[in-house]
Image (tube, rainbow, N blue to C red):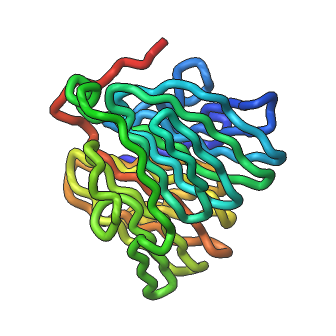
Amino acid sequence: MNIQILGPEQQGKEEFDGGKIMAQKPIGFSGQGAVTVRLGPLFYWAWGKAESAGGIGFHPHQGFEILSYGISGQGFHRDTLGTESILQPGDIQLMQAGSGMHHAESVEAGFESFQIWLEPFLNEAVRREPTYSLFKHAEFTQTEQDGVKVKFILGEGSPVNQLVADARMFDVEVEAGATYVHRLLPNRTLGGLSIRGNGGSFIIPGQESIQFVNKDFAIVKTDQEEDINIQAVGETLRIILIEVPTEVDYPLYNKAR
């Protein structure tokens, strides 16, 4: 098992609308400071926060599948498909950009969300009609056991069943001293972003535990089927996990520039 911990200084940063919206990017574009620019089909991951109301005007997307996940506050979406919608805490909006679409975003003060880009096989994706879908928090499967709460955002238990790219995503809360167990298979990579609490540990049997703190980004890979044990330290930990194939069987866009 290989576990890499990247602090905020090793992640990308970007600001929008004159600094009204600030983003920490565990996976970002080259030149924005992110050590990691891709995990398999996971192409981009931005953690955005708005201290005041702001927005981003109409801009284009093509081919990629773009998810936004609301954490707090409200965000507002408009697009050239005629959609107008509101993203609230716990909601997922999915744009499958297909042959191309434009959208605009505005947010209220206190808004916090993730935007995540996944890459399907682009030669096929750009031939599909663009679509927009909104999924409300109450539609998602959630479990609670032994001090661990899990919300199934992508993969089994999720209403998001039209995604083409291979990805599983979980919103996990772990009470202090409790442990979340994630089974990871070969040729799968797990990315984890710690967003609440003072941190936690990856517990590896027979080895020293690997510590991480709030805002750290963890990347976990294994050559064999293994259980990944994540334990909260001191207070409740909230960590967002995305699992993707380490390699896919189609060519991926080279975004190094």
Along the horizontal axis of the image, is 157 left or right of 139? left
The residue that appears at 39% across and 75% down in the rendered structure is 141
The residue that appears at 51% across and 80% down in the rendered structure is 178
Q: Quadrant of residue 87?
A: bottom right
The residue that appears at 56% across and 30% down in the rendered structure is 34
Residue 1 visible at all: no
Along the horizontal axis of the image, is 100 left or right of 57? left
Above or below — where is 194 with respect to 203?
above
Above or below — where is 243 with respect to 64?
below
Q: Residue furthest bottom?
A: 146
The residue that appears at 67% across and 75% down in the rendered structure is 235
Between 12 and 232, the one lying in front of the other is 12
Q: Position of residue 38 (x, y in %)?
A: 41, 32
Along the horizontal axis of the image, is 117 left or right of 22? left
Q: Position of residue 53 (x, y in %)?
A: 80, 45
Q: Position of residue 58 (x, y in %)?
A: 60, 28
Between 185 and 132, the one lying in front of the other is 132
Along the horizontal axis of the image, is 207 left or right of 84? left
Residue 16 visible at all: yes
Q: Quadrant of residue 125?
A: top left
